[in-house]
Structure formats: C-alpha cells, structure tokens
C-alpha cells in the first residue's frame, strides 16, 4: 500500500495542533481569569471567531472545508472538547493542559493498527509532487483494495474512503480498518478495530460515537459502489485539477491499476477506473466492531451494528448544523458530566463552569 509522509492513520498530529495554535492571536481570545478563585476559562465561541474570516462557517474556519470521519467521533463525545483540540488550545496554556497522556494512548493504538495492516500488505513510501499526486495516493490505496477483493482476497485493511454522504455537499475522508469479503457470494462486511485501556466493553456514549463512525464509513463506501460520487465533486472540494499530469512515481503506479493497456497520467483517468471497478462490487451488508485490550492484545468482544438509516441521518444533520454555522457548539449534558472528570480541558472549559454555576444555583433553591 502506498504512503506519503505524515499521512498514516486517521489522527491529528501534534504538528497540526501546534500550527493551529500559532494561528490564534492569544491576546484576543476571551480568556477569563478569576484571580480570587484561580479559575481560568477559554470560550469556544471566541476561539472560533478568532480563526474566521468574514462569513466563514466552522467547517471552513477550523477544517479547511472538509471533515474527517474521526471529527464527528470527537464531536459526538463533546463539541467543546473537539474545538479545544482542533484549535490547539493546549499549546496556549501548556501549564494547565499537558498533552502527554493522550499521545501515549494514540501511539499504542496506532501501533496495533499498523501491526494488523502489515499482516496483509507492505507499506511503501512514494514521492508526491503535487496536491493531485497526494490525492492519487488515496485513490490508489482504495483501488488496490478493490482490485484485491475482485481477485478473491478475503481481507483488506486500512482502506481509504471519501465522499459526500446523504447527497449533501460536505466532503468527508476516512480510513476503514478492515473489509472482509466472502469470495463465493461477494458479500462484504466492514470491521472496525478498537483498542481499549481496560478489558470492559465500551460505555453507551462510546458506542454511540463508534456506531456513527462505522455507519458513515458504510455510507461513503456504498455511495462509491452505487455510482453516487462524481469526479467533479472531488475536484471542487479539494481544488484539484483532474487533468493535471501526475509525477513520475504516481504515474507508474497508477498505470498498473487502470483498466485497459494505457498510461494513466491524471486523476480523471484514475477516478474513472476506480468508479468502474468499484461498481463491480456489492454494497457493505454487515458492520462489526471488534474491541481489543491494548495491553494483552486479546479480543474483549464484538458489537454487531444495525443499520438504522433514520438514526444516522438525524445524527448527521445535527452535527452538520454546527459545522455549517447554524447553531452554537454545545458541551456535554448534565447526565454525562462524568466525561468532564476525565477531560484534559475541564479546568479551562467555559461550558463546564456555566453548568457548575447553574447546578449550584439550583441546589441553593432546592435547599431553601
Ligand atoms: S470539561 Fe466537559 S464540557 Fe468541557 S470540554 Fe471537557 S468534556 Fe466537554
């Protein structure tokens, strides 16, 4: 599988966060310091405002116009936490938020994913010379998996996926952990691999995020199989030139995957091949999540995810309302306040502070 530098996995690197933080004018962010109580909070809304140009919505302000599926996973956990992470706020107040712990967990999980990936294919580094080359790497990796499935492979791992689900114009990228294919029936199952610190199955909230993730992957993959994704939509979202000639290395690789005995020199031809081949597959008809214990690498359990179209569309619409600027971000509900106790941003979170004040007031009223 082809890889270019800094592009492994569906995670946000520290470098991106540092970059995000340096783009914020620290002086202009609403940092509320209450010296009596020693409390300091940072407003999410002001973080978003300071990252914006006139008329931009949060999708453009903090995500450059498209989303990763993993963004929705963070969002479904807590929108405020996601904004703090994506705007790199930890680098503004390192004395309060040391970002060390999460990195260790992410690294351990990534290592296990990489080990599983290497069981089914090698990773090769290739040279890219343009944005079109970089996107071609994703297309080639997806195309390689599709070729393998069409040739009878039972398993493909780390399969890139992209598209604009539900016929809307918000573009998503993601990486499917595993596709399993029954070579007899050509039925395809999606498997998501989750590593956990402890050996219990996840909470309801975590399951909610995971279901959202896998059902979105399914939607994106099935859209390609059904022929619902257009080359022009991809070009427009990533500002790519479909006719621009690939660099030498990408051209050689692309030519191996194209239908017919001809040179594949641009995204137009490569995407044509991708769409033609993927439409020979069937849609994903089963979705499974495997939970594995990080320390001893044993399976904790499986979760078979039912496809609930109404549920996923409702979730999608709710989360998009934030990204498209139709509502303010929200933090966790009072019933999920336990999330705040294990949150790196609890000390600076204005949402948590407001909720705590409200609870205090209500308690005083009830005591009277
Ligand atoms: S403290 Fe609570 S509301 Fe605030 S970011 Fe963390 S989880 Fe979200």
Image: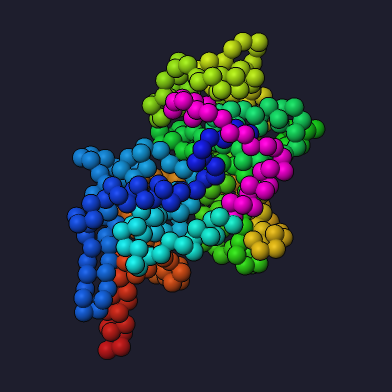
User: In the rendered view, does 347 fall on the left or right side of 211?
Assistant: left
Q: Quadrant of residue 240?
A: top left
Residue ID at (42%, 69%):
340
- Residue located farthest toward the bottom when viewing the structure as drawn: 368
Residue 147, placed above or below residue 203? above
Q: Quadrant of residue 206?
A: bottom right
Whether residue 268 is visible to the viewer of this picture, yes or no, is no
**The C terminus: image quadrant:** bottom left
Residue ID at (39%, 59%):
81
Residue ID at (55%, 42%):
8
Task: Considering the whole magenta stretch, tell me its main secondary structure.
Answer: helix
The image shows residue 198 at horizontal and vertical percentages of 62, 67
User: In the rendered view, does 32 fall on the left or right side of 227?
Assistant: left
Residue 159, placed above or below residue 146? below
The image shows residue 151 at horizontal and vertical percentages of 75, 27
Residue ID at (38%, 50%):
17
**The N terminus: image quadrant:** top right
Name the one closer to the observer, 52 or 229. Answer: 52
Mark count:
0
Which region of the structure is painted magenta?
Answer: 109-136
Name the one closer to the observer, 239 or 101. Answer: 101
């Amino acid at each position: 599988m082809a890889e270019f530098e800094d592009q492994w996995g569906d995670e946000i690197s520290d470098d991106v966060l540092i970059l995000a933080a340096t783009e914020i004018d620290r002086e202009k962010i609403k940092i509320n310091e209450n010296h009596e109580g020693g409390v300091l909070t940072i407003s999410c809304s002001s973080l978003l405002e300071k990252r914006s140009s006139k008329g931009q919505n949060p999708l453009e302000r903090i995500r450059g116009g498209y989303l990763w599926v993993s963004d929705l996973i963070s969002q479904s956990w807590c929108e405020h936490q996601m904004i703090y992470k994506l705007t790199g706020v930890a680098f503004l107040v390192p004395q309060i938020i040391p970002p060390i712990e999460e990195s260790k967990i992410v690294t351990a999980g990534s290592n296990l994913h990489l080990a599983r990936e290497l069981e089914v294919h090698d990773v090769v580094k290739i040279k890219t010379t343009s944005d079109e080359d970089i996107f071609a790497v994703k297309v080639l990796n997806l195309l390689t998996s599709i070729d393998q499935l069409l040739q009878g492979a039972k398993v493909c791992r780390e399969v890139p996926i992209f598209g604009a689900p539900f016929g809307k114009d918000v573009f998503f990228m993601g990486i499917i952990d595993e596709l399993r294919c029954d070579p007899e029936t050509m039925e395809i199952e999606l498997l998501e691999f989750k590593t956990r610190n402890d050996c219990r199955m996840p909470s309801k909230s975590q399951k909610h995020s995971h279901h959202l993730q896998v059902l979105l992957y399914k939607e994106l993959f099935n859209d390609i199989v059904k022929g619902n994704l257009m080359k022009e939509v991809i070009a427009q979202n990533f500002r790519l030139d479909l006719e621009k000639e690939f660099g030498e290395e990408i051209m050689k690789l692309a030519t191996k995957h194209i239908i017919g005995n001809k040179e594949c020199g641009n995204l137009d031809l490569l995407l044509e091949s991708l769409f033609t081949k993927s439409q020979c597959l069937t849609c994903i008809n089963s979705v499974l999540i495997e939970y594995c214990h990080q320390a001893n690498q044993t399976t904790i359990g499986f979760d078979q995810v039912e496809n609930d179209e109404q549920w996923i569309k409702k979730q999608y619409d709710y989360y998009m309302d934030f990204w498209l600027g139709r509502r303010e971000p929200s933090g966790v509900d009072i019933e999920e306040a336990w999330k705040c106790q294990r949150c790196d941003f609890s000390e600076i979170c204005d949402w948590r502070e407001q909720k705590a004040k409200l609870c205090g007031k209500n308690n005083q009223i009830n005591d009277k």
